[in-house]
Image (cartoon, grey):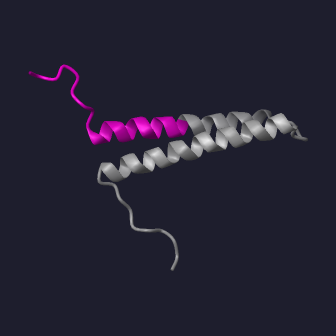
Amino acid sequence: MTDLYPAADQRELLRQAAAAHTAASADVETFLRRLPEVPEPADITEYANLLSREERARADRQAAADAAGLQLPSMESE
């Protein structure tokens, strides 16, 4: 039986992961544009949540890039 919904190829998964990371980064930027001069505890909590989401999205994007064959050598200095 033929699968009616074939799995997306790795490049499409990478594009989707990149779009999710871009959206998460844009949300951080939007937050920072409206951040008051003196942040309140709720602002700090929101920022932490936004950063966590952005970091997870970046990790997902990197995993998708690795799966698509875009593995980069370590960029850390020895």
Q: Residue furthest right?
A: 38
Left or right, residue 53 beside residue 74: right
- The image position of residue 17, as x and y in percent, is 43, 39
Decide whether residue 10 is among the magenta residues.
yes
- Residue 32 in view: no
Left or right, residue 4 beside residue 35: left
- The image position of residue 53, as x and y in percent, is 59, 39
Which residue is located at x 87 percent, y 40 percent?
Answer: 39
Q: Residue furthest front?
A: 1
From the viewer's perspective, is residue 2 above or below residue 32?
Answer: above
Decide whether residue 21 is among the magenta residues.
yes
- Residue 57 in view: yes
Which of these two is toward me, 43 or 15?
43
Which residue is located at x 26 percent, y 37 percent?
Answer: 9
- The image position of residue 21, as x and y in percent, is 52, 40
Q: Where, quadrant-wise, is the N terminus in this rendering?
A: top left
- The image position of residue 2, as x and y in percent, is 11, 22
Left or right, residue 4 beside residue 42: left
Report which quarter residue 36 is drawn in: top right
Which residue is located at x 38 percent, y 62 percent?
Answer: 72
Q: Which residues are magenta?
A: 1-22
Q: Residue furthest left?
A: 1
Left or right, residue 49 beside residue 45: left
Which residue is located at x 66 percent, y 38 percent?
Answer: 50
Which of these two is toward me, 29 or 48?
48
